[in-house]
Amino acid sequence: MSNELLLLTGMSGAGRSTVAHALEDSGWYVVDNLPPALLLGLVQASDSPRIAVVVDVRTGKYFDDLSSSIKELRGAGINYRMLFLDASDQALVQRFESTRRPHPLQGNGRIVDGIIKERARLEEFRADADQVIDTSNLNVHQLEKRINEFFKSDGASGVRINVLSFGYKYGIPVDSDLVLDCRFIPNPHWIPELRPKNGQNSEVSQYVLSQDGVSDTISNYAALLKKMSSGYLREGKKYITLAVGCTGGKHRSVAIAEELAKQLSAMNNDFEIEAHAVHRDVGRE
């Protein structure tokens, strides 16, 4: 019986194939488009240490068996994690149009009609997922990198925190578990010599981190996350996405995300906290 089971699902066009290939390259045994009723039998028959199973609406009416199949896994004492891939309707429509392929649920309607139907069918699984990744603004290589970051330390007994900087003008990331608003900090955008740079630049970082109240905010928030992480871990949630936002996602949020990730990774705990910073909107302006 496998040591690890990952259920990979989500919206059609959100990148399931890319993730499946990335997992396969990392040594996972990947089964694509499996009818959910076969899940328990596959796991019991396999001797692979890590199995990833792609389950989605392509199986048609058989997809309706997923809820009962998950109950079977739990009843058999098999632990699993669920990774859900999502994207905005606009991004999904553009992807289907670019490939000139129909959405599996659109029938005689429009692509957006299929997307609406699929969101309704997947609603409960998105809510129960251990990790949700919004791929709207990720290309293939960026998505592969995210997957490698999430699963490179699967054997660890701690928590991985994805500190994601973003700009409010581009929308709050849909895959965020927590949101930290940095718009209380003076904006480097209004300083001519700092405007073209971003928060990874030392001058911008020093400016942001030296502002009144910022140091205390970061240290206090890191301490809060440490306490929350122990609870998350106890409840079986090993992956947390903290979204850190400012107006454009270029200066303040980037500098804060970098510093928060650094402080979280350096903390002494009874369990490991591995944090890394990712910047969604740098370069979009």
Image (tube, rainbow, N blue to C red):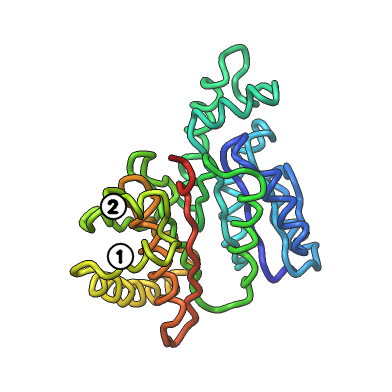
Write down the quadrant of residue 242 in the picture. Answer: bottom left
Real-space CA distance between mark 2 and mark 1, rounded to the nearest whole angstrom? 10 Å
Q: Position of residue 98 (x, y in %)?
A: 66, 24
Residue occupying image coordinates x 44% and y 62%: 201
Disc 1 is placed on an element classified as: helix
| Residue that carries the numbered disc 2 in the rendered image | 191
Residue drawn at point x = 52 percent, y = 38 percent: 87
Q: Which residue is mark 1?
A: 207
Q: Is residue 72 left or right of residue 116?
A: right
Q: Which image quadrant: the C terminus? A: top left
Q: Amino acid at mark 1?
A: Tyr
In the image, residue 108 sits, relative to residue 140, either above or below, namely above
**Numbered circles on residues, count:** 2
Relative to 67, say whether 205 is above or below.
below
| Residue type marked 2 | Ile
Q: Quadrant of the N terminus?
A: bottom right
Q: Residues within 10 Å of mark 2 (few under 14, many from 20)?
A: few
Please tell me which residue lies in front, 263 or 187: 187
* Residue at figure coordinates x 52%, y 20% from the top left: 113
Question: Answer yes or no: do the residues labelled 2 and 1 have beta carbons within 8 Å?
Answer: yes
Q: Nearer the viewer, mark 2 or mark 1?
A: 2
Q: How dense is the environment of label 1, judged by Cα within 10 Å: few (below 14), some, or many (20 and up)?
A: some
Coordinates of residue 208 in the picture (x, y in percent): 30, 63
Left or right for 235, reference 211: right
**Residue drawn at x 44%, y 74% as measured from the top left:** 262
Q: Residue furthest front?
A: 193
Closer to us: 49 or 11: 11
Relative depth, front residue between 205 and 233: 205
